[in-house]
Every structure is written in C-alpha cells, then in structure tokens.
Amino acid sequence: GDLIAGAVLAAFGAYVIWVAAKLPYVSDVGPGHGFFPLWLGIGLVVFAAGLMFASVHKAKSSSQSWNSMVRPLAGWLAVMIAIALLGKIGFALSFIILTVFLVVALDRRPALLAVGVAVGLAVAFHLIFVVALDVSLPKAVWGF
C-alpha cells in the first residue's frame, strides 16, 4: 500500500512541478506565483520517494496481503471522488460525504457520530476560510 501511495504522490508531485515551472518563480515584490507550488511539488516527490524506499525495505522483511491494501485504496478512491464532486455539489456537501464515508466505512464508527463530525468540520472550514480569511470555496447552485 505504501509503495502505491508513494508512486501516486510522486506522480502528483511531478505534475505540480511541471505546472509550477510554467509560472513565474519571482516577481517584483518577492516570490512569484510558481515559487510555492514548485517547492511543494519538490517536497512531495522527496517524501514520496522516502515512503517508497521505506516500503520496499519493509516488504523485504514481511509479506503483506491484498486485504491490508483495501482500506487505503478505498480512502484514496473516496478522496478522488470527493474532488471530482467539488464543482458539482460544492465544498461543504462534498466534504461532509467524504468525512461520513471515512468515519463510517473505514473507521467503523457510528453514523450519527460521523454526521456530527462532518457537519462540525464543514462549519469550521467555512468559518475559517470563508469568514475569517475571505477565501472562496467551491459552491453548488444552492449557495454553499
């Protein structure tokens, strides 16, 4: 599981580096638009390589079954689906659905607890980003 996750993260980091390389690295007043994405992409690739290296050495000492990879892959798939739904149903509902799935299906906790945590986190994100920081989050047709 760590090897696959590391490979996916490394590929995503390489994509971030590729896109950031097209942006200006510096501007007249300091770092340009490509400065932070470039270094974030480099960091992703470095840490993903470390994760893959550690997983290869760990795999040599112990064998892992396919069942141990199902939960991490389900988590990755849920995050990818939530990202795909952002533009259609908005951040709040997409985040609530993702959180409920992760808590109920992967952590095996009660559904009522999952809904409470999901709604509380969605409200907290809205207060922090939209209200306090004035950053817009993706919205659906119903306004949130």
Image (tube, rainbow, N blue to C red):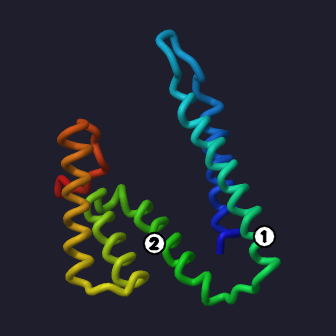
Q: Which residue is mark 2?
A: 78
Q: Position of residue 79 (x, y in %)?
A: 46, 66
Q: Earlier in the sequence, mark 1 or mark 2?
A: 1
Q: Position of residue 45 (x, y in %)?
A: 68, 49
User: SS of the residue at dot 2?
Assistant: helix
Q: Position of residue 66 (x, y in %)?
A: 66, 88
Quarter containing the C terminus: bottom left
56 on left or right of 116:
right
Kind of residue at badge 2:
Ala
129, 83: nearer the viewer: 129
Residue 31 position (above or below residue 133): above
13 on left or right of 71:
right
Number of residue marks: 2
Q: Which residue is mark 1?
A: 56
User: SS of the residue at dot 1?
Assistant: helix
Residue displayed at 26% across by 68% down: 118
Kind of residue at badge 1:
Val
Quarter containing the N terminus: bottom right
Q: Which numbered disc covers residue 41?
A: none
Q: Position of residue 91 (x, y in %)?
A: 30, 57
Residue displayed at 29% across by 47% down: 137
Residue at the far top: name it. 28
What is the distance, in whole Å, between disc 1 and disc 2 at their CAs? 26 Å
